Amino acid sequence: MDAERVVIVGASHAAAQLCGSLRQHGCEGEIELIGDEPSLPYQRPPLSKALLSGESTLDDLLIRKPEFYEKQRVAFRRGRVTRIDRASGVVELEDGAVVRYDRLVLCTGARARRLELPGADLTGVHYLRDAADAAAIRSGLDGVGRAVVIGAGYIGLEAAASLRKLGIAVSALEMADRVLQRVTAPEVSAFYDRVHREEGVDLRLGVGVAAIEGDDHVTGVRLTDGDVVPADRVIVGVGVVPNVELARDAGLAVDDGIVIDAHGRTDDPCVFAAGDCANYPDGRYGRRLRLEAVSSAVEQAKTVAATICGKDAAISALPWFWSDQYDLKLQIAGLSGGYDEVVLRGDPSTGRDFACFYLADGRLIAADCVNRAQEFMFAKRAITMGLAPDRAALTDPETALAELLRAPSVVAG
Amino acid sequence: MGTITFIEYDGTTHDVDLVDGASLMELATTNGIPGIDGDCGGEASCGTCHVIVDAEWTSATGTRSGEESQMIEMSPECEPHSRLACQLKACPSLDGLKVRLPEFQM
Ligand SMILES: Cc1cc2nc3c(=O)[nH]c(=O)nc-3n(C[C@H](O)[C@H](O)[C@H](O)COP(=O)(O)OP(=O)(O)OC[C@H]3O[C@@H](n4cnc5c(N)ncnc54)[C@H](O)[C@@H]3O)c2cc1C
């Protein structure tokens, strides 16, 4: 292979995977990883889960131990890349350093979307994207009696659950008329709505936020209807914005993420992208997507590594996701967008475990599984196989799901 | 210290140093063993660290939990001694342990 020097921007999930996969595919050249956070790549998912509730610490979160980078001969440089000079094949850092590359991989991830509201800069108002955010939220939490979470997506709901575990009174505010509206069926939203209320969360749907109140530290959140929800802490979870500026300024195509092909390449054959910052064509779902999930960061990184090493690989693994809230372990296989039918196994209106299968034209395309690991693994395989399962069998608790995999009614195509 | 051996599906073997208290998933990823990525970081959420324990070692490792079974038993490559590597902690008595990898992770 002719790539002597691979430079990776962003010490991220995708980056950690890339370092190992590049070596596994036979890359012998230098690998340099440049990241603007103090740490080697770490897991972000626990930031709103076990870390926030105090059940794990930052040290537990490294994706790969420091020895791994030594063994894989990866040099880590702390710094922020400010410019890509494609003509010269170098990246420039904030501190003035210039780093040469033969192949460049952008793993710059995404950043939390900021609130543009009066009072949004008050102390006590937090976002949750990186370890520093999590540390800031954790510090002084003992004195916090009331917290407000803005946004009832996964991160907002996980934060609400973690804060409730610590005995803090939580209000969760959501603009839409149901929680998780962007990502799940109404049945699943209703389930999480019920559980959060059972756990004591003051959930307010269909509300707008007008301002954050307080003199210097937050004291409350004012809604558009004039109501004020008191708060000592506010956690904002209203989505993320992909970090595409470097790519855009270098003249690479950007369209809701850095545009890559199925092999992870941008429109410059020496520049690649992977992870939350990348917009890729998904063969299974037949559309371009930008996902915010560890699984797709890992899959894209593997593909980029293979491509750099001259192997023919395409992004193909089924995306999946998970979310932990209270005693609920949600595992999601596939993407439900575009479904035309929902089939339930178990009853989400009572109890705390069920699976919600999403079908399109009879074919299984996704599943949300709450405390149902078996259904999750079944769905992963069934979706990959293109299975069009019998609805009655899917619902019937007596049907062994493994049977459905054995006698498949596979839809052609 | 001791040694744990990972055997890839194609028969390639990797001996890694045993670190007391680390999970087999951590040992595999720290040592860059192909075929174990540990996407979820070790909370038995993803099922991508399936290994098959050598039969003579199963009394030392113990058997898989119900949670692991739920995840692994859907795999066509599931065997009686299949485990999730993230749920298997290394300890001195496992010095010499051999585990095989399936052809595919799910
Ligand atoms: C609180 C929280 C909970 C989550 N929970 C889950 C979950 O349960 N399951 C799941 O699958 N996903 C979850 N996610 C999403 C998951 O963490 C992301 O999909 C994943 O981290 C994406 O990895 P990445 O490789 O794209 O980059 P990231 O992990 O976002 O890292 C990008 C890195 O690049 C650095 N960087 C950016 N620009 C530059 C520059 N110019 N120079 C140098 N460095 C730069 C950034 O500072 C950052 O360190 C969660 C995310 C958060 C924040």
Image (cartoon, coloured by chain):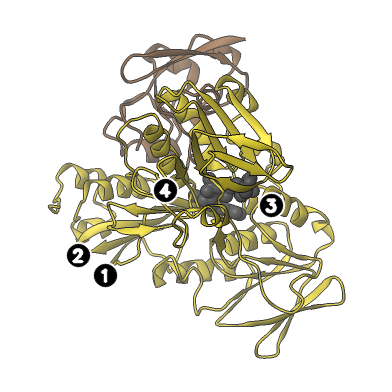
**Residue A72 appearing in the image:** yes
Identity of the amino acid at label 2?
A: Asp
Q: How dense is the environment of label 4, judged by Cα within 10 Å: few (below 14), some, or many (20 and up)?
A: many
Reading the image, the residue beneath label 3 is A53
Q: Are marks 2 and 1 in contact (CB under 8 Å)?
A: yes
Which chain is brown in the rendering? Answer: B
Q: Chain of mark 4?
A: A
The residue shown at (49%, 28%) is A20
Instruction: Look at the image and give the colour of chain A.
Output: yellow
Return the disc, 1 or 3, that comes first in the chain's sequence: 3
**Residue B7: image location, x then y, percent:** 39, 16
Return the disc, 3 or 4, that comes first in the chain's sequence: 3
Q: Are marks 2 and 3 in contact (CB under 8 Å)?
A: no
Q: Nearer the viewer, mark 2 or mark 3?
A: 2
Identity of the amino acid at label 1?
A: Asp
Per the image, label 3 sits on a secondary structure element best described as: loop
Reading the image, the residue beneath label 1 is A340
The residue shown at (14%, 54%) is A411
Q: Is residue A223 left or right of residue A306?
A: right
Where is A21 relative to A294, above or below?
A: above
Reading the image, the residue beneath label 2 is A361
What is the spatial separation of the Cα atoms under label 2 and label 1, in whole angstroms? Answer: 7 Å
Return the disc, 2 or 1, that comes first in the chain's sequence: 1
Identity of the amino acid at label 3?
A: Ser
**Residue A183: image location, x then y, percent:** 43, 65
Query: Does mark 3 fall on the same chain as mark 2?
Result: yes
Q: Nearer the viewer, mark 3 or mark 4?
A: 4
Reading the image, the residue beneath label 4 is A266
